[in-house]
Amino acid sequence: MSTSESAITFSDFILSLGHTAAVHFGDIADPYTGQRTEPNLAAAAHMIELIALLQVKTKGNLIEPEARLVDDLLYDLRLRYVQLQEGEKRIVEP
């Protein structure tokens, strides 16, 4: 496998952080156990803060689709966080 085939892109990395947040929200199954867990808002908030930190630190260095991905993902994750705080149902169904 060449280096370019095995290299993770910035978008892949950001999406993996978003996936981890979804696991912490309890919206999707944990990839290790195959089971959904109870929401862990503290862990989900940590992932949101990490993505927001990356957004700040990469400002001006991303191509437009990458910047839009980060913006959209943060919007969706923050909305989901508020929904869970208010006790709303999951938006992702099995």
Image (tube, helix red, strand yellow):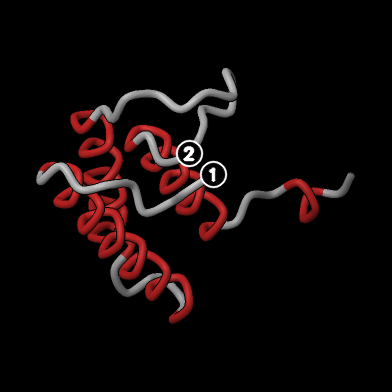
In which quadrant of the rendered view does residue 78 lie? bottom left
Spot occupied by residue 20 in the image (x, y as percentages of width and height) = 43, 37
For the residue pair 32 and 83, the one nearer the viewer reads as 83
Instruction: Identify the residue at horizontal 59%, vertical 24% (top origin).
Output: 34
Spot occupied by residue 89 in the image (x, y as percentages of width and height) = 27, 47
Left or right: where 78 falls relative to 33: left
Q: Is residue 17 above or below residue 77?
A: above
Instruction: Identify the residue at horizontal 80%, vertical 53% (top origin).
Output: 5
Select label 2 or label 1 by which is in front. Answer: 1
Q: SS class of the residue under badge 2?
A: loop
Residue 27: image tag? none
Q: Earlier in the sequence, mark 2 or mark 1?
A: 2
User: What amino acid type should be assigned to the residue bearing mark 1?
Assistant: Pro
Instruction: Identify the residue at horizontal 31%, vertical 53% (top origin).
Output: 54
Residue 94: image tag? 1
Name, please, the residue furthest toward the right.
Answer: 1
Q: Which residue is mark 2?
A: 28
